Image (cartoon, grey):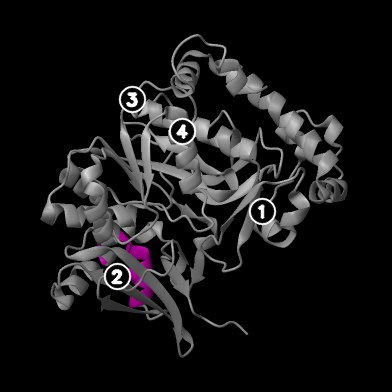
Amino acid sequence: MNIISLIDKFPFGNSAQKGFFLYTKLPPAFFQKMEEENFRQTVRYVAKYSAFYKRKFKESGIDASRVRHLEDLKDFFTTPEDIRQYGEEFICARPDTAFETTGTTSKKTKRVYFSRNEIRDAGWAGAVGLWGIGVRPKDRVASAFDYSFWVSGPVLQASCQVLGCFHIEASRMAPEEFYDRVADYKINVLVGDPSWLLKLSEIAEKRGAWPMKLMIGGGENLTEEARRYMEKVWRAKFILSYGQTEAFGAIGMESLAGDGFHLNEFHNFFEIINQDKDGYGELVYTTLNRRVMPLVRYRSGDITRFLEGHSSSGLPGKRISKLKGRLDEWIPTAAGNLAPWMFEELFRQVDGIAEDWQIFIDKDGLKDILEFRMEVSNGEDPTAIKNQFLKAFKSGLPDVWKLCEMDLCKMDTKIFPKGTLREGRKMKRILDNRKFV
């Protein structure tokens, strides 16, 4: 069922406006029926055209022609490692382009292939989301996403084409140069990585912020303190989007209410597996309209949960919470299993540190040592910063603190100049340097 063909029959507005109208007016049962039918079609399609799925379905004893519901796929999933090892075998139709992603724990890229029609469809879904947060054809958009093998820039460009709004693509140039070159374009919507937008905001705070309608961040998570700071500088809302290259960009986007990510149910079927008592588990999705390299029950590696009830924005559809962390970032140590989200609030309580922090795990003799690395923002006193962090650590994670006190593991704090810790596009919050022979 091609949702874009359906909305193009509506006699008003552009495609983004029509799509948003459809999303807000059609009953949930319609989307459920659409998802179920497209899910069955996708399973049958990959079983016919993909060498990977043919082999894996056979190994799992799955007859694609008999698949009606998720349960019929038993415990079948696809993973990032599958794409790294067998990416070419996923392909079902001739691709026009490809994008790459390294993820957070592996340097070997995942190559994901698409057609130009799929880029157009993804751009339409993004345009519907942008319409929902107030972007209109009269607005002027500037993007600072990295364009090297990354999907975010092309998706945004396709979305702006659907919206019919002005758009310039700066790629990820230095924020200082961006400020000098873009200020005169009368841009009122800024899009980019949160960490990059944070640096631009620091420049704007000193040199002056121009009138802004919205800021939209994607590609990494964001602390609420950083969000509030940027909103204060620009006097505009900061909206987070969430996506993966494998899903061709946006999986979901916050509304203006900021109460979770509204999911792109036009193009994906979502589930959360291995949920804990609070409903947190791994987000899994099946692409519903891709024909070059469809993904069936793809394990995103991201930990989140479905949000109950309706958004305060009044928008319908499924929502997920802000990401709690990544499955592959859980690190077993002598202090227990550690993940970045456990420490976010602790670092947030420390005055004078920058946005980037890191936990470095190594061996000191036979014992694990946890080294908490922080960047100073304006040359603050390192001793005061260390004391603040240790106080927050002892209060916020008493069980982990106790294990360190018992000398089951060691801990240390180190201060670094701002801009030292980040390497590449994504910040690696935990680095495990231990050698297990």
**Mark 1 or mark 2, earlier in chain:** 1
- Mark 2 or 3: the one toward you: 2
**Residue at numbered disc 4:** 161
Circle 3 Cα neighbour tier, 10 Å, few/some/many (<14 / 14–19 / ≥20): few
In the rendering, at what x and y percent does residue 290 appear? Answer: 67, 37
Question: What's the residue type where badge 1 is placed?
Answer: Thr
| Residue 273 visible to the viewer | no
In terms of sequence position, does the residue under pointer 1 or pointer 4 come before the other?
Answer: 1
Query: Which x, y percent locates residue 245?
Result: 55, 50
Callout in the foreground (4, 3): 4
Crowding at mark 2 (Cα within 10 Å: few <14, some 14-19, many 20+): few
Q: Which residue is mark 2?
A: 419
Quarter that holds the N terminus: top right
Q: Which residue is mark 1?
A: 79
- Name which residue type carries label 4: Gln
Residue numbers of the magenta segment: 394-405
Residue for badge 3? 312
The answer to whether the residues at label 1 and label 4 have Cβ atoms under 8 Å apart is no
Q: In the image shown, does 183 or 61 lie closer to the viewer?
A: 183
* Mark 4 to mark 2 CA distance (whole Å): 35 Å
Q: Is residue 77 left or right of residue 118?
A: right
User: For numbered disc 2, what is the local secondary structure?
Assistant: loop
Q: What is the distance, in whole Å, between disc 2 and disc 3 at their CAs?
A: 37 Å
N-terminal of the pair, mark 1 or mark 3, is 1
Q: In the rendered structure, which amino acid carries the disc numbered 2? A: Gly
